[in-house]
Structures are given as structure tokens and as C-alpha cells.
Image (cartoon, helix red, strand yellow):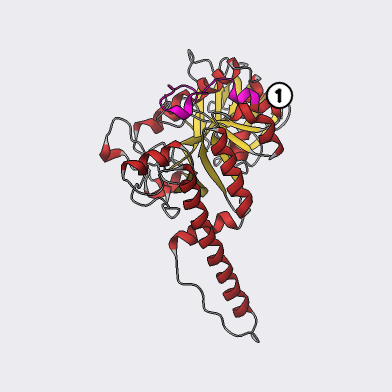
Amino acid sequence: MTIYNALIKTMCGKDISNGYVTFSNGKITAVTAGSPDPASITENDIDAKGANLCPGFIDAHSHLGVFENGLGFEGTDANEITDPATPHLRAIDMINPRDVSFREAAKAGVTCVISGVGSANPMGGELLAMKTVGEPTGSCRIDKLVIKTPAALKFALGENPKTCYNERDEMPTTRMATAAVIREQLFKATRYMDALEKHHAANADPEAEPVDPPEYDIKCEALLPLLRGEINAHIHCHRTDDIFTAIRLAKEFSFGYVIVHATEGGLIAEDLREENAACIVGPIICERAKPELVNLQIDTAAKLHAAGVSVAICTDHPVTPIQYLPLTAGLAVKGGMPEDAALAAITINAAKICGIADRVGSIEVGKDADLVLLDGKFYDFMKEPVLVVVNGVVMQK
């Protein structure tokens, strides 16, 4: 299939003022300036009529399918508040793709999301990256939606763990205890990893004395991809002190990290640039529902971008319904962020920050055919996308 006569926002270089994109078997096969041979155009191809063709939008932090739409306890699987350290919990076991919000996301052009556990526990569990529509026929089986699992591990600092465990009269009830819970489990996992490596090294050397492996520990096993640099920790933190604690922990145990929410990130933008930190900003469309949100402003993403910090924008669905991700990026524009930077924050930057840029985030040959055709600005909430393509399949309105 081909979409032609489009203004292509490739997000991997210069825009193509008039061009066409061809895709087959779910992948982009050509991105070309100019017009295709008229003789090659079929009735299945789409004339964009000068509209903007963008990569599918990516929500870098959500709980899609976790806090299910319109349900209470029965549909809420976000937090296992019985143990403050649960890195072994897997998002793939908690998400219900039949939630109506998947359909609403796809209709709005949100074709990919990071979803998973909430922020009650200092160590919450695994996050996954997934499509909002199954391939190739709209399957609602979560295994067919997954792009990457685990995509990251979720940690949380600040008010949420304090509040949740204070109500249980258990540790952690302070910020220092929250950091201590994370530090203790990381230390255990580091020792576990060292013991595994000694075991494997001894087995590989026929002249060495055998070394028994450590006793299996599912929590430590879940932390190995983080400690080996294969995935990052996505660390929930709003206040500046919590952000710096996150950085301190990451340095202490040499793991990659992303600051999630970064509500006060604009106040320390230069520090974050010096640390080469990446931030996922949001939700923006929400109330200041707790004390640590007192400095919530729509210009945070703009300040971080201006300082040279890599920024993505999120809804934190269902805090902001996921279909309003483009509008959320539009508010960042109102707050001073350049339009192209705001679009990058829900496409290529989100993909890079979340470690899935090999599949999504830009219009390039070989990437997934996730596309959004727009008659106007990407954040114009008065207009729905002209069409949305997920995995090369045109969504039906």
C-alpha cells in the first residue's frame, strides 16, 4: 500500500514537502520524495491531498489496560502493596487489551505505549512496550501486542511509597527508607549476579574447581537485565530532591535510568543536562492532587528541551485519558516548546528514551508501518486523524 501526496514528518531528518510512503507486511518499504508512477497507483492506495503524515504517536508512560476504564477494584492491577520490593512482577500478566481505552488510543493516533505497574512500591516491577492494536487482525491477545518486554523496570520515590506504606504502618514511611529498600535489593542482586558469573566462569574452564550457582532468587533475576545494562529503570519522581536521589542510586549501582514525571525538572534543567538524564514529562492535563505537584507547570518540557535534555511527553493514563496525548504535547507547545520538539517528544524521542527506536518513532524503511495522517496540527483536538495505520493495517473509524 502507498500513501502519496503527503507532507512527510519523517522525524529522522528533514521533512519531505511532497512525497509518498509505501508499506507491505507491516513494514515501511519506501519513503520517497515526489509522486509515484501514476500507473502503479491502485484503488487501495491513499491520496493524502497534502496532509501531514507522521509516525504513530508513542505514550512513554501509561497504565493502559491496568486501571481499566470504568472499573473499580476488579479492574485495577497496578500495585501489589504487600511488599515494597517487587521487581519480578511482569506487566504482561496485568494488562487487559479488551479495555475500551485501547481503541480510543488508536483512533487518536497513539499506536504504541509503555505500560505497567504503578508507583506504590519503591520497586514496582517490569514495564512493557506494546501496540494499541494487535497484528494483523486486531487481536486482543497481549502476547501479540508486545514490542519489548521487559522494556524497563519501574522504581518510585517520594510521596507515593510513603503514603501507601504509612497507611499499612510498614517500612518505608520516609524518603530515606524508600531509597534504602531500593538500595538493599540492588545490593542483593549485585551479589547474586557476581555469584552467577563466578559459577559460569568456573564451568567454562575445565581446569577450574566447580562453583555452585546461587540459590534461585526471582527478584534478583528480574534485576539482572538492569544491572547488565540491557534495560533502564524508569524512576517515578516529582520533586527535585527525589530526582537527585534517583540519580544518586543510578550512579551507585551503575544502571541506566529515565526520570518519569519530572514535575520540578524545569527548576534543575541544567543539572539534568550535566547528568545526561532523560525525562518523561507528564501528566500535564491534571490537577495538583498532592503536595509534590505544587510546581506543576506546562513549561517544564520546554525548559528541559531548551537546556538540551532529552524529553518525552506522557499522559500517565488514566490520569489524563490516553487519547489526549497529542493535546498534552500541544500544551507543551503553549508552554514554549517548539512544535517539532513536541512532536518528537511523542514520536522519535519517546522511542529512543524507551529503547524501541529500532521499531517505531520515525518514518524509515524497515520500521513498523505505524502512521498517522493529519489534516492540520498534530495537537488540534478539534480534528480527528484522517487515518491511522498500525502494523500496516488501516484502522477503521
Predominant secondary structure, magenta span: loop
Q: Is residue 317 left or right of residue 275?
A: left
The stretch drawn in magenta includes residue 98: no
User: Between 367 and 235, which is closer to the camera in this rendering?
Assistant: 235
Q: Which residue is drawn at the image coordinates 60% and 26% (left, top)? A: 54
In percent of width and height, residue 173 lies at 40, 44
Residue 333 in percent (x, y) is at 60, 18
Q: Residue at x 57, y 33 (%)?
A: 240
In terms of depth relative to the viewer, which is nearer, 116 or 257? 257
- The residue singled out by tag 1 in the image is 16
x and y, in percent, of residue 34 in the image: 72, 23
**Residue count near mark 1 (Cα–Cα under 10 Å), binned few <14, some 14–19, many ≥20:** some
Whether residue 180 is situated above or below residue 379 in the rendered picture: below
- Which of 359 and 166 lies nearest the eye of the viewer? 166
* Furthest residue in direction top, as rendered: 382
| Side (left or right) of 182 relative to 311 | left
Q: Quadrant of the N terminus?
A: top right
> Looking at the picture, does residue 358 appear above or below residue 101?
below
Tell me if I can see residue 19 in this picture: yes
Residue stretch rendered in magenta on the structure: 284-303
| Image point (40%, 45%), residue name | 142
380 to 102, vertically: above or below: above
Q: Position of residue 324 (x, y in %)?
A: 46, 23
Which image quarter is the C terminus in?
A: top left
Seen at 56% across and 71% down, the residue is 195
Q: Is residue 28 visible?
A: no
Q: Amino acid at mark 1?
A: Ile
* Res 119 → quadrant: top left
